[in-house]
Image (cartoon, rainbow, N blue to C red):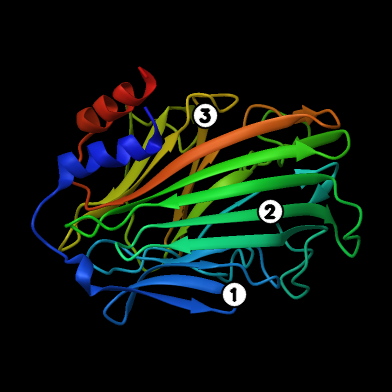
Amino acid sequence: MSFRSILSILAFYLCSQGHSQAQLSWKQEKFSISLLRHDSIIWKYNYDPAVRPHFHPLTAPDGTLLTDYAPPDHPWHFGLFFNWRDINGLTYWDYKSKKLLESEGVQFVDKIRIKTKPDGSANIILKLNYHPLYQPKNVVLREKRLFSISPPDQKGQYAIEQTSRFRAKTDLLLDRPPRPGEPRGKIWGGYAGLMIRMHRDLPRPELFATSEVKKEKGEHYPWMAIRYPEQKQPFGVLIFDHPKNFNHPTAWYFTYREDRCFFSPVVLYDSPKKMAKGERILLRYIIHITDASLDKDAISTLFAKYTQN
């Protein structure tokens, strides 16, 4: 069963009277594409070469702002984004400092193609080059990234499917900061890959998966969700880890403080990954922006239907 089929099943579970697709429109700018309802952004994808590509803002079905952009504590966090943390010893994630807004490595958008439809669905295809800073000809990794974005359903829910195909241009080590128990390990170690930075004004969310989540970092689940049930109109974010991703079911990384919250399936949490020159890997995820009406059993049923096909 494809991710598109999963979206159809989700729509069956969640469909109700609500928003009209006739209210939707597109806004294309030089380095971004946005889906709007009337004059309000539902989601926006940014590909300005000055920063790594990302979705921001993402909004909940009721219009609440979900994502944060370049917050003071981590100015390299941009809404919903994907990036490797370290490649061959160079950091592609953090900036060298909060004043010098550059990383040791660059994730560069080489080409982009965008196809939008009147119903609010879209496909975005990027070709990305990873290379050391100021060395654009020294490409070490290429990525072809496809986003298939569903139209908002009648409740205003939508889903983003990400498919990333990587090919090593040289022998590589994909790595992350060392975890506790490893040499020079840090309590915050282990992160790399897909991450969503939730907005700083949101309250602490509920965190749930296939079983009780006992630790914020390092537990393995095929999917995880965060939700905000205390809002006037509850909402949440659900992420599926594709069964064919390496290290599936993935480890998860969640952090909450009063001024910060981020949430991530961390494919490298347990160990770095070596890639030989010419080797290819495939990663797929689905990120569903929901009204939080699905409970754990319903989500597990959906995931089981997906993995059985």
Q: Would residue 115 appear left or right of 30 to someone viewing this image? A: left
From the viewer's perspective, is residue 87 above or below residue 111? above
The relative height of residue 128 versus residue 68 in the rendered view (above or below) is above
Q: Kindly identify the amino acid type of the residue bearing the numbered disc 2.
A: Lys
- Dot 2 falls on a residue whose secondary structure is strand
Residue 116, by quadrant, is: bottom left
Observer able to see residue 18:
yes
Are circles 2 and 1 on residues that touch, CB within 8 Å? no
Place residue 13 in its image quadrant: top left
Along the horizontal axis of the image, is 140 left or right of 101?
Answer: right
In the picture of the structure, the residue carrying the numbered disc 1 is 31
Which residue is at the far bottom? 39
Instruction: Identify the residue at image location x=42%, y=27%.
Output: 222
Residue 178 point in image, percent of width and height: 72, 37
Q: Secondary structure at mark 3?
A: loop
Horizontally, residue 39 falls left or right of residue 107, namely left
Cα distance in 3D space between marks 1 and 3: 32 Å
The x, y position of residue 287, in whole percent, is: 41, 46
Amino acid under disc 3: Thr
Which disc, if any, is residue 250?
3
Q: Which residue is mark 2?
A: 127
Q: Residue furthest left?
A: 17
Screen quadrant of the C terminus:
top left
Q: Secondary structure at mark 1?
A: loop
Q: Quadrant of the N terminus?
A: top left
Could you classify mark 2 by the number of other residues whose Cα lies within 10 Å: few (under 14), some (14-19), or many (20 or more)? some
Q: In this rendering, is residue 118 above or below 90?
A: below
| Residue 106 against residue 181 in the figure, above or below | below
At 81% from the left and 35% from the top, the residue drawn is 173
Picture residue at 10% right of the left edge, 52% below the top: 16
Q: Return the disc, 1 or 3, that comes first in the chain's sequence.
A: 1
Choose top left, top right, bottom left or bottom right for residue 112.
Answer: bottom right
